[in-house]
Amino acid sequence: MNRRAFICGLSGPELTLGEADFLAAAQPAGIILFARNVENPEQVWRLIEAARDAAGSPVLVLVDQEGGRVQRLAGPHWPRYPAARAFAHLGATDRERARQAAWLCARAMAHDLRLLGFNTTCAPVLDVPVAGADNVIGDRAYGEDADTVIELGGAVAEGLLAGGILPVMKHIPGHGRAMADSHFALPVVDTPLAELEASDFASFRALKTLPMAMTAHVVFTAIDRHAPVTVSAKAIGEVIRGFIGFEGLLMSDDLSMRALSGTLEERTRSCLAAGCDLALHCNGKMQEMAAVAMSASYLEGAGLRRFEAALAQLKEPEPFAAEEAEEARAEALAALA
């Protein structure tokens, strides 16, 4: 089945008839769930099955499940996972234990997600925050230097893949210097290119073989002073595909965020023309979803190959010790206390 180059959200905990018809007709490459779609494990499983049946296969089924303050599946039905920064705190006294804990927590999280029918999570965050930056990244980052982010973010990606879940590294090529939250405003970064390459871009370059990545709605004036990365052919071509060398499936961040300008139709066409493989729209509003769908082309050529290559990396989970994962969660959470 042909897939259109977009990912969409859903309005609530049950698939409506209108949404079922839309998914069947629009044929999105993916669906993404949020807290508004989540009540309990059985309900989430039913929703995913219904959406997958309507959309057809193959389709990505995504969620933002990082741990900490970005955890769409939360208590009382799912474990509390630590924020990324907890592993850096743990690593201050035992670096190897921190890496092991990051892997175990990711492996356990993958187990949770796979039971429900997910195959993708939008993690790990590989941004390297700087002092004074907006707190939109904050403790979602695995450290304050590229080497720590590479080590711990890489362990998380490995744990997710071992559990049969595709990781999406974000926000490529880096959101750590943003002085504004791109949900509400357009961040502009004036840092020289050499400094960006040595720090901000380094974590993504080191982990460039991961299957998927999400763009940053950030303007880097050293690259393209006129457009944020998501809609900049220069930033995607020269930095993401060029300097970083990422060859995997590239999705935009949410097109409904206020960092972007223009209509949703314009945003969709612009991000795909710039080099994103998939346009992401999250809020589940049908009129907006229809606008994105009408503006998204069918996957073909390199985009289709990257989509198929990402799905090909899904595999049956390797065994893991649930008790070890629980101990790792507790240890990382204690490090935050």
Image (tube, helix red, strand yellow):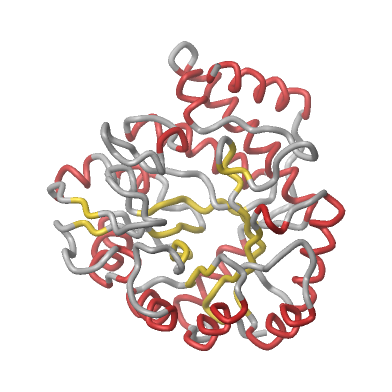
Determine the residue located farthest toward the top in the rendered image.
Answer: 93
Give the number of callouts: 0
- The residue closer to the viewer here, 157 or 284, is 284
- The residue closer to the viewer here, 320 or 272, is 272
Q: Is residue 296 above or below residue 336?
A: below
Question: Which residue: 75% across, 71% down?
Answer: 51
Q: Is residue 3 left or right of residue 239?
A: right
Quarter of the image that includes the C terminus = top right
Q: Is residue 261 left or right of residue 4?
A: left
Determine the residue located farthest toward the right in the rendered image.
Answer: 42
Question: Which residue: 79% across, 51% down?
Answer: 39
Question: Which residue: 44% across, 78% down?
Answer: 264
Q: Is residue 213 left or right of residue 282?
A: left
Q: Is residue 157 above or below residue 93?
A: below
Q: Is residue 195 above or below residue 100?
A: below
Image location of residue 189, percent across then percent down: 21, 51
Image location of residue 43, percent across then percent down: 84, 57
Image location of residue 26, percent across then percent down: 63, 85
Quarter-wise, where is residue 22 in the image?
A: bottom right
Quarter-wise, where is residue 225 in the image?
A: bottom left
Question: Which residue: 47% across, 64% down?
Answer: 254
- The residue closer to the viewer here, 103 or 231, is 231
Image location of residue 82, percent across then percent down: 59, 30
Quarter of the image that includes the N terminus = bottom right
